[in-house]
């Protein structure tokens, strides 16, 4: 027979019934009978007498009088704002509420929990041993049932594995899907036997749930099955550990392991190993503090396992194989990163109040270095020191950086000794280096950074105050010396040249007017840009500037058109030579007319050559947007140009 009961897997919603007559005929009516039993009084209903149940929905009675007959009667009512019901019929009386809710809690747990959560919990505790049958309740119930069954089998399971392992009858270890966390370091074959046996107990527990629990077959999907097993492995691992520890066959191993762990805990502090290796480097000078830490920790383990310091040698009792596993486990639980964080926590707590001392040292150093003369490089001529204080986003003069960084570590060490005093002084070189580099130096440089940012803020505010005057001076200079607009082809072209020239003028004036403090900051592009922008805005709005630019452009344009005419005459020379040669009789009226006709017949050719030559000239490139105007000029000037060309030809010697 199938272990799974044949029961519909679909659960009713809040307004649905179970299939067939099962819901109508059995759970609801049984719940009515149960209502009398739990009341513990003959013919009393629990639902109508128990204050805790009635208060969930606020059940109470109301007296009503018939206006026609004057008869009075009592009816049930509920308090507004209290918990609702699994379906409308449950709201007719406490008895029906009890019967409906009980049936739904047991056979429609999710719907009951959604509709009436407090009643679900109340009835679960009253009738079902604390269980509910919604998804969360089923998981919790199955976990508890399975844990009881597996827990009862753990002693015999461990005993069998120990016996098989010690007598050589156990199978060779194989991989397990989810090995248990065993505190004791066991031989691989014994550990594998326990893991495999526990997995078999889990499988048996799941099968038993499906055989005895109504919803289990449909409910225990692969995902829920896995979650259930992982919960058992997590919750029952300590019980397995206790049973293993009590086995006589592994008692000597257990005692030796406990002694080794206690010995290591007493005598080895990973924080010391971390600090000891803080500045370690390999033969090529590269940092190898992590490798150093692993070497030191491994050597310490081996030393104490072998009985270093006169203690008993624990290696024979533990065995080579188990000792190797214990060593690997012990090192894996004490990583380099974790030891570093624990060491930092220790010293952070020790120097928790040192910020004020460090800030004072940083402030004194900052004031001293700002007062030092520019060009001073503190015996490191030509080198700019940027460590440990980089200046961050602020540009700081080289002599100030060198002044700070040449003495930063001295300041930190002095602050450390001042804070700790004589009784708590840190004397070990590696501890000093660790405290200096990891704990105190970042606070010192942070204080310096705050001072630099505040100085930058103050100076920038002073510079910005002078921007209007700076912009006015720059504008006056640019309007008095208009060389920067030479060559512009339009007003917009002239204005496009304003930004670059304005920035240069502003920077020059700023240096002359000393609005930048040279002893500290040298780059204030944002302030210069703001001043330059104001200059160009005012120039753009200047009618006088626009008039002057238009006058200059008009003058250059007329000069350019004159050069167009000269280009035409230059190209007409070749045609004139040809026409003169064809009609040689200089004083013949007919020849003169023919020469003029000869010149006119080549007008389009001369015009095209003139235009192409114009485009290649600086004027043609400057006034490229006015090519149509050049064409119009040539067409408009056709007669005067031809007449002048003929005149020049006729006047040839």
Image (cartoon, grey):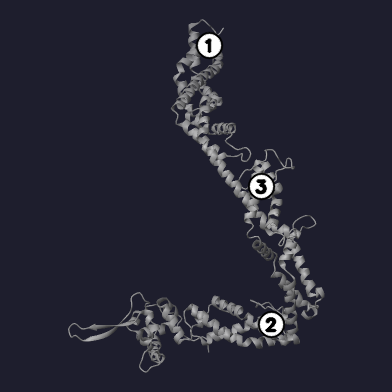
Residue drawn at 61 percent across, 45 percent down? 394
Q: Point out the residue furthest to the right here.
A: 310
Q: Which of marks 1 and 2 precedes in the sequence? A: 2
Badge 2: how crowded within 10 Å, few (<14), some, or many (20+)? many
Give the camera-side residue of 136 and 502: 502
Task: Give the alpha-carbon distance from disc 1 to disc 3, as whole Å.
Answer: 88 Å
Q: Which of marks 2 and 3 precedes in the sequence? A: 2
Which residue is disc 2 drawn over?
193
Marks 2 and 1 in Cβ contact (< 8 Å): no
Residue 100 appears in the figure:
no
Q: Nearer the viewer, mark 3 or mark 2?
A: 3
Give the camera-side residue of 214 and 410: 410
- Measured as percent of width and height from the top left, residue 435 is found at 70, 58
Q: Point out the residue furthest to the left here.
A: 68
Q: How many marks?
A: 3
Give the camera-side residue of 527 and 213: 527
Residue drawn at 78 percent across, 75 percent down? 305
Which residue is disc 1 drawn over?
649
Task: Give the alpha-carbon distance from disc 2 to disc 1, as whole Å.
Answer: 121 Å
Badge 1: how crowded within 10 Å, few (<14), some, or many (20+)? many
Indicate the secondary structure of the residue bearing disc 2: helix
In the picture, the disc for residue 365 is 3
Quadrant housing residue 58: bottom left
- Measured as percent of width and height from the top left, residue 495 is found at 50, 31
Residue drawn at 69 percent across, 44 percent down? 403
């Amino acid at each position: 027979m199938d272990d799974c009961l044949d029961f519909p897997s679909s659960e009713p919603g809040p307004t649905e019934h179970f299939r067939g007559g099962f819901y109508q005929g059995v759970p609801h009516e049984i719940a009515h009978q149960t209502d009398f039993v739990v009341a513990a009084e003959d013919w009393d209903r629990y639902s109508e007498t128990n204050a805790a149940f009635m208060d969930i929905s606020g059940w109470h009675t109301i007296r009503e009088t018939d206006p026609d007959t004057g008869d009075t009667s009592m009816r049930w009512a509920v308090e507004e704002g209290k918990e609702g019901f699994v379906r409308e019929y449950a709201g007719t009386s406490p008895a029906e509420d009890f019967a409906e809710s009980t049936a739904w809690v047991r056979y429609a747990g999710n719907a009951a929990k959604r509709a009436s959560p407090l009643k679900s919990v109340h009835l679960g505790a009253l009738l079902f041993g604390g269980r509910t049958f919604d998804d969360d309740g089923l998981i919790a119930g199955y976990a508890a049932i399975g844990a009881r069954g597996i827990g009862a089998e753990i002693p015999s399971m461990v005993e069998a594995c120990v016996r098989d392992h010690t007598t050589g009858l156990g199978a060779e270890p194989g991989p397990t899907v989810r090995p248990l966390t065993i505190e004791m370091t066991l031989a691989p074959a014994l550990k594998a036997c326990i893991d495999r046996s526990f997995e078999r107990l889990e499988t048996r527990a799941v099968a038993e749930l499906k055989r005895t629990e109504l919803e289990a077959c449909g409910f225990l999907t692969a995902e829920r099955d896995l979650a259930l097993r992982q919960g058992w492995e997590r919750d029952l691992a300590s019980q397995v550990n206790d049973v293993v520890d009590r086995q006589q066959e592994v008692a000597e191993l257990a005692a030796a392991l406990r002694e080794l762990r206690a010995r290591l805990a007493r005598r080895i502090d990973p924080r010391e190993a971390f600090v000891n290796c803080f500045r370690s480097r390999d033969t090529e000078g590269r940092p190898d503090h992590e490798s150093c830490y692993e070497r030191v920790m491994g050597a310490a383990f081996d030393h104490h396992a072998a009985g270093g310091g006169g203690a008993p040698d624990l290696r024979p009792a533990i065995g080579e194989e188990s000792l190797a596993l214990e060593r690997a486990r012990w090192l894996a639980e004490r990583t380099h990163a974790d030891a570093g964080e624990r060491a930092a926590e220790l010293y952070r707590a020790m120097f928790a109040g040192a910020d004020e001392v460090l800030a004072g040292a940083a402030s004194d150093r900052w004031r001293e270095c700002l007062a030092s003369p520019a060009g001073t490089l503190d015996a490191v001529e030509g080198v700019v020191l940027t460590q440990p204080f980089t200046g961050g986003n602020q540009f700081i003069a080289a002599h100030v950086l060198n002044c700070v960084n040449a003495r930063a570590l001295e300041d930190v060490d002095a602050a450390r000794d001042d804070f700790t005093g004589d009784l708590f002084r840190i004397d070990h070189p590696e501890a000093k280096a660790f405290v200096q580099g990891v704990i105190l130096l970042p606070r010192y440089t942070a204080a310096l950074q705050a001072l630099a940012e505040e100085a930058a803020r103050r100076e920038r505010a002073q510079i910005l105050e002078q921007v209007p005057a700076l912009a006015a001076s720059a504008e006056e200079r640019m309007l008095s010396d208009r060389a920067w607009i030479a060559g512009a082809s339009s007003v917009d072209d002239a204005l496009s040249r304003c930004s670059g020239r304005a920035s240069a003028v502003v920077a020059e004036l700023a240096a002359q007017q000393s609005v930048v403090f040279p002893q500290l900051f040298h780059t204030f592009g944002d302030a210069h840009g703001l001043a330059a922008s104001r200059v160009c805005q005012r120039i753009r709005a200047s009618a006088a500037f626009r008039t002057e630019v238009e006058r200059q452009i008009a003058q250059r344009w007329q000069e350019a058109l004159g050069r167009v005419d000269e280009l035409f005459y230059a190209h007409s020379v070749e045609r004139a030579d040809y026409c003169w040669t064809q009609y040689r009789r200089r004083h013949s009226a007919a020849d003169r007319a023919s020469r003029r006709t000869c010149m006119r017949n080549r007008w389009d050719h001369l015009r095209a050559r003139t235009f192409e030559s114009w485009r290649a000239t600086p004027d043609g490139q400057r006034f490229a947007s006015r090519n149509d105007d050049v064409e119009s000029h040539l067409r408009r000037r056709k007669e005067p140009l031809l007449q002048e060309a003929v005149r020049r030809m006729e006047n040839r010697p």
